[in-house]
Image (cartoon, grey):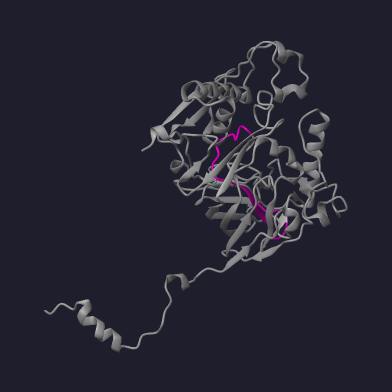
Amino acid sequence: MRTLTLAVLGPILAAVALPALGDTTDVRWATTVEVAKQGNHCADDPNCMNRYHPAIPAVANADPGDVIVIHTRDALDSDLTLDSIADDMAALDLNLVHPMTGPVHINGAKRGDALEVELLAIDPDEYGYTLIVPGFGFLRDLYPDPHIVNWRLTARGAVSDQMPGITVPYEAFPGSIGVLPGEPEVQAWKARETALAEAGGIALAPQPAGAHPAAVCGPEGSHKDDCLRTIPPRENGGNMDVQQTQVGTKITFPCFVDGCGLFVGDVHYAQGDGEVSGTAIEIGGVVTVRTRIVAGGAEGMVAPHVSGNDEIRDIEPTRFHQTIGLPLKTAGEVPVYVTYLESEKIGALENLSEDLTLAARHALIQMLDYIQAEHGLTREQAYILASVAVDLRVGQVVDVPNYIVTAVLNLDVFDKFRN
């Protein structure tokens, strides 16, 4: 049999009239809804919000199954750059936290349904930052001074002149993603947070200054006293900062309003479980999702759920160092997170009962000591590294009185351990 080579086939094919086709870029199957950024900041952008209220109007509509491409801003809506220094943090306005892109109305969704949001892709900006903000973070009493690390980002990892010898792997996820609350939820959540504040706890009341959209939430807004801050996560999702919500996972939210009101923002290039300094590697980026409505699915849901396949395994370190935390402290110390309880008993004790937060603090402080002693980082560098590459994990919650929390450092971030 004669073999037909390209030399033989060429003249034959040239004689056959074939339709002109583009390359595979022109082959489409999905309906895409794109929600772009406009202007330099949330204040300039009709597609941006930094408060939650059901009166905030939708900026786009999408059908279930549509591919929704959402362009997001960094968590602080900042003007930070690769040249920024700690002194520049004085200009940051925390009333602007967090700018969210949305809400997107999902056609056909009703209050009482659930909305499944599948994360399809995250495309990061080229610059990110991690901060120590005075008065904020898990160890805010031990780290009172401002500090900044500026990161150059690639698909391989994040590097910084302020963190030599370290490459943080790319493991992006949306720090904030969720749906709008309904009016009953706004009033219930506002009431419980007000009660906490009156008891001396930390709670953030509605703050019209810097709020967007201004027509709803600003100082002259129609609902200025009821627009909820985006800093605390709640039953509608929001600022959950759960690093396992990687591309490929599906997050299911209860819908509190018709259309659900999907929003996304506060993308993290990488983060350790705990985000202990208060910030991850904070970036803007483009998040692509697809949604599915679960009719009546909100019944029995009290918070969002996440499902996935091998995403958690893929972000696990190949080598690690771990410290073990117990609910221990020095006599006379009242941990900052329980000062509002005004208990005379706590100060004198060296051991608290069944206290996961104190155990997490104990594990983290040991880890910071290890990073400084074994890897030569400064106090601030160690805290920053812990925020982006140390996972706080619950070991056990049964061996009373000493529950266990561990701190796990991903040693893969050190270039000396990599090829």
Quarter of the image for the N terminus: give it: bottom left
Farthest residue, direction left: 1
Read off the magenta span: 254-277
Quarter of the image for the C terminus: give it: top left
**Residue 260 visible (yes or no):** no
Q: Does residue 277 lie above or below 159 as drawn?
A: above
Farthest residue, direction front: 83
Which residue is found at the position 69% from the left and 43% from the top?
A: 234
Which SS does the magenta portion mostly show?
loop
Question: Which quadrant of the view contains residue 11?
Answer: bottom left
Q: Position of residue 17 (x, y in %)?
A: 34, 88
Q: Position of residue 381 (x, y in %)?
A: 56, 30
Which residue is found at the position 70% from the left and 31% from the top?
A: 134
Farthest residue, direction right: 220
| Residue sitting nearer the eye, 295 or 135 | 135
Tell me if 74 is positioned left or right of 221 in this view.
left
| Residue sitting nearer the eye, 146 or 204 | 146
Q: Position of residue 163 (x, y in %)?
A: 52, 34
Q: Does residue 223 lie above or below 15 as drawn?
A: above
Verify whether residue 40 appears in magenta: no
**Residue 359 visible (yes or no):** yes
Q: How many marks?
A: 0
Which residue is found at the position 53% from the left and 54% from the top?
A: 123
Question: Which quadrant of the view contains residue 357?
Answer: top right
Q: Position of residue 207 (x, y in %)?
A: 82, 44
